[in-house]
Image: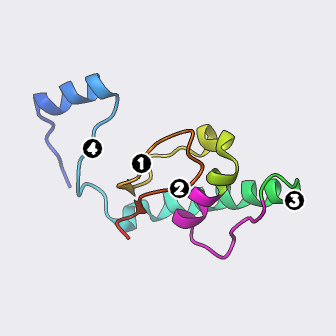
Amino acid sequence: MAIALTDDHVSLFHEQGYLVLEGVLDDDDLAPLWGEYSELLDGLARRLQADGVISDCYADLPCELSCPRVLAEYPQRYKFLNSPLPLINAESDPSDKKPRGTVNGS
């Protein structure tokens, strides 16, 4: 899908450092990213659990549910796992270790 950026889009990008464009990518477009991100998170979570840093690697959960749980137990890894994956209604408070909000609108 071709999207024409407006002057407002460009201004917002320069002001905020990012731009949200709804409906540009669908699930099929994002599937490879989700796969790679899931593998990265799974490997990291297994190492952290083996080292006794986190209590569970949450391998039985999909990536969009395991990631907030890993980060709740080990928030120092946030900078390595931060991704523009679609988190909807998520509140951001670095001092709060409990994940809040919904992921992917669920």
Quadrant of the image for the N terminus?
A: bottom left
Q: How far, Cα to Cα, is label 3 from label 1?
A: 30 Å
Point out the tag, 3 or 4, that comes first from the N-terminus.
4
Question: Disc 4 on helix, strand or loop?
Answer: loop
Mark 2 closeness class: few <14, some 14–19, many ≥20 residues within 10 Å: some
Viewer-proximal residue among 27 and 45: 45
Residue, disc 2: 99
Which numbered marker is on residue 91? 1
The colour scheme used here is rainbow
Q: Give the mark, 2 or 3, whose residue is nearer the N terminus.
A: 3
Q: What amino acid type is highlighted by mark number 4?
A: Val
The local secondary structure at tag 1 comes to loop
Is 79 displayed left or right of 52 in the figure?
Answer: left
Kindly report the distance in space between the C-alpha atoms of the residues bearing marks 2 and 4.
22 Å
Task: Read off the residue under disc 3.
Answer: 50
Query: Compared with residue 14, is residue 44 higher up or lower down, i.e. above or below?
Result: below
Q: Nearer the viewer, mark 2 or mark 4?
A: 2
3D distance between C-alphas at marks 2 and 1: 8 Å
What span is in magenta?
55-69
Quadrant of the image occupied by residue 44: bottom right
- x%, y% of residue 35? 56, 63
> Label 4 belongs to which residue?
20
Q: CA distance from mark 1 to mark 4?
A: 17 Å
The picture places residue 31, in percent across and down from the top left corner, at 46, 65
Between discs 2 and 4, the one toward the N terminus: 4
Q: Earlier in the sequence, mark 1 or mark 4?
A: 4
Q: Residue at x 31, y 57 (%)?
A: 25
